[in-house]
Image (cartoon, rainbow, N blue to C red):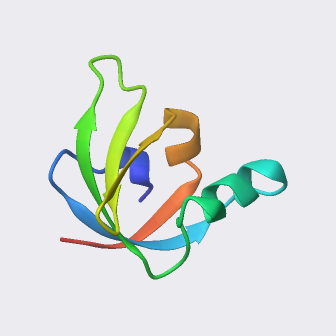
């Protein structure tokens, strides 16, 4: 399952970020690393962007970025 597949209000634990290069570095700088809990707060009507809450910070991700983030546990 990927972060883009989570519904509003669901919380998941990040498993793996499947990208390389500058995009991976940008996501890591935002705090998106393995073992971190992330909650989907809001999704735009067309599905892009996706607003998530990570360590009490609200981040906005593009759908293509969220599809590259695997989620292990869903609560």
Which residue is more in the foreground, 4 or 24?
24
| Residue 21 pos. (x, y %) | 85, 54
Q: Residue at x 37, y 37 (%)?
A: 50
Quarter location, residue 28 = bottom right
Relative image position of residue 44 (x, y in whole percent): 30, 24
User: Residue placed at 52% from the left, 34% from the top?
Assistant: 62
Observer-nearest residue: 3 or 55? 55
**The N terminus - image quarter:** bottom left
Q: How many tags in the picture?
A: 0
The residue depicted at 81 percent of the width and 50 percent of the height is: 22
Q: Residue at image x 80%, y 57%? A: 20
Q: Is residue 6 above or below residue 46?
A: below
Q: Position of residue 12 (x, y in %)?
A: 31, 68
Residue 49 lies, with reference to residue 5, above or below; the image says above
Q: Quadrant of residue 8?
A: top left
Q: Is 8 left or right of 48, judged from the image as shown? A: left
Q: Is residue 20 left or right of residue 29?
A: right
Quadrant housing the C terminus: bottom left
Q: Furthest residue to the top?
A: 46
């Amino acid at each position: 399952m990927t972060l883009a597949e989570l519904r509003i209000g669901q919380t998941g634990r990040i498993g793996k970020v499947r990208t390389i290069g500058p995009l991976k570095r940008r996501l890591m700088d935002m705090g998106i690393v393995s073992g971190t809990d992330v909650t989907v707060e809001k999704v735009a009507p067309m599905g892009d962007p996706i607003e998530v809450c990570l360590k009490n910070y609200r981040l906005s991700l593009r759908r293509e970025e969220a599809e590259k983030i695997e989620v292990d546990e869903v609560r």
